[in-house]
Image (cartoon, helix red, strand yellow):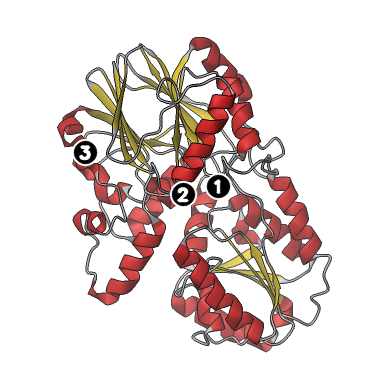
């Protein structure tokens, strides 16, 4: 018998966490944070925070409430994050120790990011961190085996997790898109998915963030061409040139560096998260930014470099944190005059990102953009493609895997409903083999 407990990420974006019990053995997929709640809490508390605690973070709904599986605690065999985004790994430093005998099993890049976070936050995690390569397999127990299926997303080494059980495969597929032309890494492992389909997939958890978007998500090479068009096709001679994007999007950063070199500008990364993810990518030999880029991590480094850049801004390409308008980011602090660099009219700023659709992000970006426009900065927005599959990607994925049961995850209710509508178009029936469950709810499947 298989029992599923929805801990986080069901009816919300973020805080992803799912527990699956196979007879008397439990596996936890993901332990993520809710970024807006986490940022709000840490900024409001500021210097009053001596050390973040699981209890305090759970109280403000910044990390999952795993009390739902207190009765399963001694049965947890492993914690398995699907990739390195904080809404999938960010709660591991605070919650994993409750299951100290369970290893954290993840890809090399995810492991490197997690270890960097633990080091930066001075957290000693008792759990063993086991590295499993993409498309690798590991025996968990006599009854359970874990397989990582390579997928494409907006951060490297994202996998769909296949848990092999006596009752069929449990497939955890969040986040992903169907990108046959990635800029970094390989295309999705369709052959492995076909093999799993033949073996028999009992239930699949599927990323439904864009289930209501009637399209196919463009490939990352499309975003690269959009960047080329703006960075090389618009005359920025004599002006400052800044780009902001997701720090974890190593493929996008790779494209930005490539075009910066063609412009013969000195490239500088500024911000803690950019440093964190770049270091992790270099540790596992995904890229080598250090030979072309100066990476400024700490506030003092950023300040000193900006003083230098201010003398001849046209000589530099600045890649900065702050694409969501976060008040403490490098970009917002420059715009507010808190850092020693002043925008002048006709400077260029490229947002190689979209606004993550939450109220706080929309408000912060509106404040930032108004500030920049008043300074005469030229804005280039939405130079981006998503890392999440849209409705037609999801249709192709469901057709490919032919899972007996489907569960929508990683979205709010309207998106989950859109996925269920799609599944019903394809012959599934709500409540029978496509299931809408929300945080704190359970589902039992008896094959």
Residue 202, percent across and down? Answer: 43, 17
The location of residue 141, given as percent across then percent down, is 30, 19
Q: Which residue does the image show at 61% across and 53% down from the upper left?
A: 288
**Label 2's element?**
loop
Q: Residue at x 40, y 58 (%)?
A: 35
Pick the quarter of the image with the N terminus: top left
Query: How far apart, in angstroms, are the residues tagged by discs 3 and 1?
Result: 30 Å
Q: Residue at x 70, y 55 (%)?
A: 255
Secondary structure under tag 1 reads: loop
Q: Is residue 134 visible?
A: no
First along the sequence among labels 2 and 1? 2
According to the image, label 3 marks what residue? 68
Q: Which residue is mark 2?
A: 85
Q: CA distance from mark 2 to mark 3?
A: 23 Å
User: Label 3 crowding class (10 Å Cα cut-off): few <14, some 14-19, many 20+?
Assistant: some
Say whether disc 2 or disc 3 marks the residue closer to the N-terminus: 3
Q: Which residue is labeled 1 in the image?
A: 155
- Position of 150 with respect to 437 (left or right) is right
- Quadrant assignment, res 437: top left
Q: Nearer the viewer, mark 2 or mark 3?
A: 3
User: Answer yes or no: do the residues labelled 2 and 1 have beta carbons within 8 Å?
Assistant: yes
């Amino acid at each position: 018998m298989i029992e599923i407990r929805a801990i986080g990420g069901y009816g919300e974006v973020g805080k992803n966490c799912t527990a699956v019990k196979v007879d008397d053995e439990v596996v936890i997929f993901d332990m993520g944070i809710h970024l807006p709640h986490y940022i709000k809490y840490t900024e409001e508390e500021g210097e009053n925070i001596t050390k973040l605690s699981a209890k305090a973070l759970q109280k403000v709904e910044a990390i999952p409430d795993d009390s739902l599986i207190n009765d399963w605690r001694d049965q947890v065999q492993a914690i398995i994050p699907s990739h390195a985004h904080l809404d999938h790994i960010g709660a591991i430093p605070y919650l994993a120790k409750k299951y100290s005998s369970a290893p954290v099993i993840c890809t090399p890049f995810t492991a490197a990011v997690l270890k960097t976070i633990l080091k930066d936050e001075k957290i000693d995690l008792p759990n063993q961190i086991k590295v499993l390569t993409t498309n690798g397999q590991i025996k968990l127990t006599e009854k359970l085996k874990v397989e990582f299926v390579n997928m494409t997303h907006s951060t490297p080494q994202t996998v769909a997790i296949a848990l092999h059980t006596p009752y069929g495969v449990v497939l955890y597929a969040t986040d992903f898109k169907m990108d046959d032309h990635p800029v970094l890494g390989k295309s999705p492992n369709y052959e492995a998915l076909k093999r799993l389909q033949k073996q028999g997939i009992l239930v699949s958890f599927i990323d439904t963030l864009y289930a209501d978007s009637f399209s196919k998500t463009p490939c990352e090479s499309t975003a690269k061409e959009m960047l080329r068009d703006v960075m090389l096709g618009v005359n920025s001679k004599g002006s400052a040139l800044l780009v902001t994007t997701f720090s974890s999007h190593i493929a996008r950063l790779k494209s930005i560096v490539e075009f910066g070199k063609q412009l013969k500008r000195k490239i500088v990364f500024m911000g803690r998260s950019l440093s964190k993810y770049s270091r992790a990518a270099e540790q596992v030999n995904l890229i080598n930014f250090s030979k072309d880029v100066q990476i400024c991590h700490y506030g003092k480094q950023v300040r000193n470099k900006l003083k230098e850049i201010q003398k001849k801004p046209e000589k530099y390409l600045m890649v900065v944190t702050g694409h969501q308008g976060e008040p403490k980011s490098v970009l917002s602090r420059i715009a507010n005059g808190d850092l020693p660099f002043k925008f002048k009219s006709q400077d260029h700023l490229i947002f190689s990102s979209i606004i993550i659709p939450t109220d706080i992000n929309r408000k912060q970006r509106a404040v930032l953009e108004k500030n920049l426009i008043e300074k005469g900065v030229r804005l280039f927005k939405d130079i981006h493609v998503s890392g999440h599959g849209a409705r037609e990607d999801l249709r192709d994925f469901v057709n490919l895997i032919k899972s007996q049961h489907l569960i929508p995850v990683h979205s709010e209710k309207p998106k989950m409903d859109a996925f269920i509508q799609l599944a019903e178009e394809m012959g599934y029936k709500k409540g029978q083999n496509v299931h809408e469950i929300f945080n704190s709810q359970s589902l039992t499947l008896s094959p």
